[in-house]
Amino acid sequence: MDPSPLRGLPNMNSLLEHPLLRREERGRVKVAAQKLLDKLRSEVLSGRLDRVPSAEDCALLVLEELKRKGKPSLRGVVNATGIVLHTNLGRAPLGQELYDLAREVYSGYSSLEYDIETGTRGSRYAHVEGLICALTGAEAAMVVNNNAAAVFLMLTALAEGKQVAISRGELVEIGGSFRIPDIMARSGASLTEVGTTNRTRLPDYEAAVHRGAELLMKVHTSNYEIVGFTESVSVAELAALARREGKPLLYDMGSCFLFDPKLPWLPECKTARAGIEAGADVISFSGDKLLGSAQAGILAGRRELLEAMKKHPLSRMLRPDKLTLQALEAALAIYQYPEEAMKRIPVLRMLSVPQEELLDRAAALVLKLSDLRPDWEILVRKIMDETGGGALPNVSLPGYAAGIVPRGRSVEALEEELRRSDVPVIGRLHRGELLLSVRTLLPGDEERIASAIAGLPD
Ligand SMILES: *Cc1c(COP(=O)(O)O)cnc(C)c1O
């Protein structure tokens, strides 16, 4: 092949001495420049590139790389996907208020394991236990790192070496390799499968108990629904059986509310209190799904079972951080006043925001962006948002977005440019448009989107 295009490639020295790069640290420039030159060389040799960029363009590319490298990898983004609990974008946003409270505890010393009243050692669980009990009706409670940990702890501490009866329709995989049968095997409990995938009845559980099952377990099928010819046993029926037989009932609720938010689009609302009232002996649920606080697994239920879990050595490994506890305590304190919670817990607010408000916000965003890019096609679009986080699989939330068709670039290129801008803006591509849903925008996000778009080359 003709090697001549390679001759146009700037050499390392000319890049190191380039006026655009002279003020940057030499070692970093060298690494970035070497990487760029290697990439260009191999692209030319493989025929993918027939003209190399000028020295000026190469210097700009190096500068861009240095800028990108200088930013932390984990950083804030604008979630314009309309998916409220977006698993890849950090699930529940805490919001400014909860964050400000948590920050105070995190930046200095705190009463994490200190009883301020008596001046003696305290328990890290004490800060939230009373609130969880008051909000769920449970006798006792504790918090671990996440709900997967909560399920693992409850099985390890309460069911090691014992048979646990669970419906075949509830042997779920939640994602990120959390599979109930695997968790059970790791915990040392043995799984007694009950019923069939689509139908499980009370006598199936009774038979399992008579064959030696010492615990009953129910798992909420968070991310799918079995429809059609189906039958399952309610928590209350299962609890009655558990009581008759003197066996504990464990209930992994996954994601639940702490009160019924009475949302029209929500067919049936699952609250933690309902799990306890139906008679589960221990329930577990996530702190950062529908509850809308920090990543945590909450365990609540009968006192002696909670005591056994608190004392188990595993709980030391699964214990939550002080930031988590503070964010959780602050959220739970707000939850004591449901009306306040609807306004001040961002997840609840996003789930309940009225249609008219979403429409107004989308219209305002469209106007703002159209001012910046009068030649682009930017329109209000009616869309379907989602709860996400495997929380309510079949619930769609009617919402509104700014739908953008740019000029001078493809919509895919725009999606990438916005995703890679200083504050990344994450939207969704749909039928040749970039949709920016307003439901999941937090205060200030409209300005962030506008400045990302204003900062793009024409
Ligand atoms: C989400 C979920 C889990 C895992 O919870 P994490 O907080 O993600 O660890 C476990 N069980 C159910 C039913 C869930 O929905």
Image: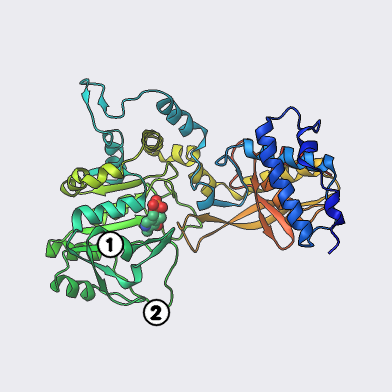
Q: Which residue occupies 13% across, 73% down?
A: 210
Q: Is residue 96 left or right of residue 276?
A: right
The answer to whether one can see residue 449 in this image is no
Please provide percent x and percent y for residue 420. Answer: 68, 45
> Can you identify the residue that label 2 sits on?
229
Res 348 label: none
The residue lying toward the viewer, choosing from 112 and 351, is: 112
Q: Quadrant of residue 445?
A: top right
Q: Amino acid at mark 2?
A: Phe
Which residue position holds label 1?
A: 184
Quarter of the image for the N terminus: give it: bottom right
Point 27% across, 67% down: residue:
166
Q: Residue at x 36, y 23 (%)?
A: 109
Near mark 2 (Cα within 10 A), the count class, few <14, some 14-19 or many ≥20, is few
Position of residue 428 measured from the top left corner of the image (x, y, whole percent): 65, 55
- Is 305 situated above or below 21? below
Q: Is residue 294 above or below residue 210?
A: above
Task: Give x and y (percent) for residue 80.
Answer: 63, 48
168 horizontally vs 14: left or right: left
Left or right, 42 with respect to 254, comes to right
Q: Crowdedness of circle 1 by 10 Å Cα count: few (<14), some, many (20+)?
A: many
In this rendering, does residue 147 appear at all?
yes
